[in-house]
Image (cartoon, helix red, strand yellow):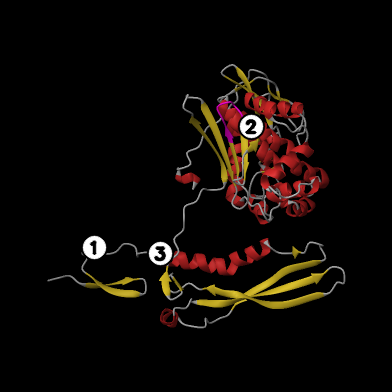
Amino acid sequence: MVNVKPEKFGKTTRMTFSKINEVMQMPNLIEVQKNSYKWFLDVGLREVFRDVADITDFSGNLALSFIDYRMDDAPKYSVKECKERDATYAAPLRVTARLLNKETGEIKENEVYMGDFPIMTDSGTFVINGAERVIISQLVRSPSVYFGMTHDKTGKELYTTTVIPNRGAWLEYETDQNDLFYVRIDKNRKLLITTFIRALGLSSNTDILEFFGYDDRIKATLEKDTTINTEQALIEVYKRLRPGEPPTLETAQAHLDGLFFDARRYDLSRVGRYKYNKKLCISSRIQGFKVTQPVVSALTGEILADAGDFITPELAYRIEQEGVNTVYVDSDGKEVKVYSNSMVDIGEYVPKFTEEELEEIGINEKVRFSVLQEVLEKCGKKKAELKEELAARADDLIPKHIIIDDIMASINYLNCIANGVGTTDDIDHLGNR
């Protein structure tokens, strides 16, 4: 006799011929898609509007901000009707916007129709122009800093770096067979890395050479660089990014700042900031090497390691936590300068706070050492004042955009790899996707 019994599959009851009982029900995989889209409608859209909030006109007198949004409860047509009419299954999206005139103080607030927004059906699909479709997530490269090495026809090692944000302009470094060091900004034409470095504030050749430890690639590139100060470099960068537009110092500086240092246009995301810190921190880069110059604490002035000392993982972490961002190490008899992005773990500096309390005020990653010192000097050990100041300066402690220290540390990392300090990345590894 055939053993047939009823079995529950979600909301559906089916007859099964299986001899072994189901230990665990089949998960409702469609629910993952539906919950994700529900989160987007309830929370994600609000974050998008917050990112573009306070749009101002050129004169700065008018400011447009988004207060709230809503979607009509019922779509115009049902799913079946949309398929029959070749229509899109959607509901109107309405946004409450406020216009402020800063000169007169007048405020106008209205509900604005933004358009029809697609709605997910119960089966996790969308109906677009009468056709039922599904959305498939694409594997993209995760925000991080990636380093690579190839060989040219003569066998010479060529190095590359890609600095990828979640949203914003990419930075791509590359070296050539003549040891010239180039950068591409946002997929534009390449320019000499030293020109870009000057535009960021290191003006003279001496400043650049001292900062990067007289590296061979930097010296070779400086010989080809025709700019001699920050002002000329800013104009040169602007010409490459905006060819045909009349360059002025003010517009060049504003454009560069907007490209990299405006959180509304450049966003690392939380995972991006974590990966930047993990890759560029000094503790992971110097362990296993001997130092060639004494390492001095930025906090106390104490000597943490003498020349010739071997760096263990524990010592490397202590050096990082003491605010040291520059260490000279020995690599096959050559002195190599290692420069980090100056981030530290805040836990040791504020022992009165638990991880949960820090998470509540937005501190969930390593913080900038210089900003943390300013906060501690201002508030001392008073927990209430410290909590308020940490919350107020959360975006300064954990920048959402790239900072100059990140850029300088990424350039330094490429030079370090060429001298045997550091590792290249496998871009096809799923951990980088």
* Residue 110 sits in quarter: bottom right
Which of the labelled discs sits on residue 412, or is there none?
Answer: 2
**Callout 2: helix, strand or loop?**
helix
**Callout 3: helix, strand or loop?**
helix
Seen as rendered, the residue at the extreme right is 104
Looking at marks 2 and 3 on the same chain, the residue that comes earlier in the sequence is marked by: 3
What residue does disc 3 label? 29
Q: Residue at x 73, y 48 (%)?
A: 257
State the CA–CA distance, disc 2 to disc 1: 61 Å
Residue 106 visible at all: yes
Q: Nearer the viewer, mark 1 or mark 3?
A: 3
User: Which SS type dominates the magenta stretch?
Assistant: loop
* Residue 195 sits in quarter: top right
State the CA–CA distance, disc 1 to disc 3: 23 Å
Point out the stretch of residues depicted in magenta: 174-180
Which amino acid lies under the numbered mark 3 shown in the image of this protein? Answer: Leu
